[in-house]
Image (cartoon, helix red, strand yellow):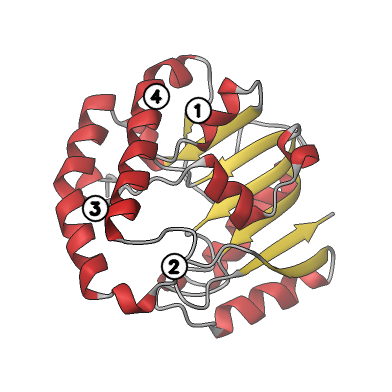
Amino acid sequence: MAFKLDSVVPWGRNMEEYRLMFQLDDRDMSKKIAGFGDGPACFNYEMTERNGDVTSFDLIYQFSKEEIEKRIEEVRITVMQQMRENKDHYVWKHIRNLEELENIRMSAMRRFLSDYEKGKKEGRYVFHELPHRLPYEVDYFDIGLSSHFLLMYTSLGYDFHIASMTEMLRVCKEIRIFPMVDLDANKTDLIGNVISYFQKDYTVEIVKTEYEFQKGDNKLLIIRK
């Protein structure tokens, strides 16, 4: 079945959020980074502006700028209504209120859209679906990042997550996955099973981050070779 854009809820984050979620220090920011499931985040744009080296991978990069922009506008009101109805499930610290949240998200996505066509031509936004093989050699990237995708969508199943993270670890020297909860902010058996699998051959670390927006989603999984 073909992937359809109307099944996607695009919701972009910015570079500062990436730094906090993934514990990226100045040294990390100078490395070759791969972002998996980046969607309409402006991390790639902001990093490119400061001469960083980021390649973003996502299924939505098969679509045009106009198609993605239209989908963003279609879901914006619905997403914000859901946020209002569930605002007690969130920590209003780094983002102080709903109005600021909407401004941050829309600003990030507009910056992404302003860079999207140029970034595609430069090979910074790559249409790809995990766990399919990436066209890169072993350890091509220093760090691989996955935000609000792997470990969160438990319905994709154990095999999907293992295969996806294995392919990420083939092309990346280390991967960082945030957060370590499912869509309801609960820790699941999937997470424990995934950690047990990779602990056999890799160094696995769980780090508490400064970033916590949804209550309980303040832990980062790091897997290193």
Q: Is residue 147 left or right of residue 96?
A: right
Instruction: Pick whichever of labels 2 and 3 is earlier in the sequence.
Output: 3
**Above or below for 131 versus 218:** above
Q: Between marks 1 and 3, how big is the CA–CA gap?
A: 25 Å
> Of helix, strand and loop, which one carries label 2?
loop
How far, Cα to Cα, is label 1 from label 2? 26 Å
Give the foreground label among 1 and 3. Answer: 1
**Which callout, 1 or 2, points to the residue nearer the camera?**
1
Q: Earlier in the sequence, mark 4 or mark 2?
A: 4
Secondary structure of the residue carrying tag 4 is helix
Q: Residues within 10 Å of mark 4 (few under 14, many from 20)?
A: many
Amino acid found under the numbered disc labelled 1: Tyr
Amino acid type, residue under disc 2 in the picture: Tyr
Asked if the residue at tag 3 contacts the one at tag 2, i.e. Cβ–Cβ closer than 8 Å, the answer is: no
Real-space Cα separation, disc 1 to disc 4, in angstroms: 8 Å
- Residue 150: tell me if it is visible: yes
Residue at mark 4:
116
x, y percentage for residue 62? Answer: 35, 31
Quarter of the figure that contains the C terminus:
bottom right
Q: Position of residue 87 (x, y in %)?
A: 30, 73
Specify the label residue 45 is tagged with: 1
Say whether disc 1 or disc 3 marks the residue closer to the N-terminus.
Answer: 3
- Label 3, label 4: how many angstroms apart (C-alpha)? 20 Å
Left or right: 114, with 185 as reference point: left
Is residue 165 at all visible to an observer of this figure?
no
Residue occupied by mark 3? 7
Read off the residue under disc 2: 153
